[in-house]
Amino acid sequence: MSETKRKTKTSTAVKRRYNEKVYDTVRASLPKEMAEAFKAKCAAEGISQAQIIKKAVEDFLNA
């Protein structure tokens, strides 16, 4: 017999509390053309926008 693994759902509120505890938000204002080009390139390459920004911050901190 194969056992079916029970799926559990974490509530949105629990996820939000965890994210607020562990993460912080950094915002940047970019010219619209630059932001659109950034979003388009990320989508075309299948890379998340957050991944690119996180890498840039890590590179800056390690320089």
Image (cartoon, rainbow, N blue to C red):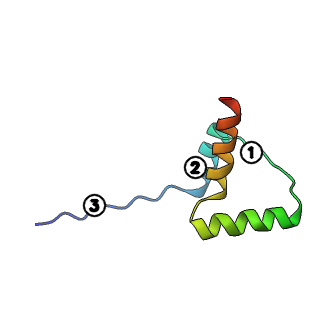
- Say which of 56 and 10 sits in front: 56
Q: Residue at x 71, y 41 (%)?
A: 24
Q: Which mark is residue 2?
A: none
Q: Which mark is residue 25?
A: 1
Q: Residue at x 69, y 39 (%)?
A: 57
Q: Is residue 7 left or right of residue 15?
A: left
Q: CA distance from mark 3 to mark 2?
A: 22 Å
Identify which amino acid the numbered label 1 is placed on: Thr
- Say which of 8 and 54 sits in front: 54
Q: Position of residue 30 (x, y in %)?
A: 86, 56
Q: Position of residue 16 (x, y in %)?
A: 63, 50
Q: Is residue 11 left or right of residue 34?
A: left
Q: Which numbered disc flags the more N-terminal residue, 2 or 1?
A: 2
Q: CA distance from mark 1 to mark 3?
A: 35 Å
Residue where numbered disc 3 is placed: 5
Q: Position of residue 2 (x, y in %)?
A: 15, 66
Q: Which numbered disc flags the more N-terminal residue, 3 or 2?
A: 3
Q: Residue at x 65, y 44 (%)?
A: 54
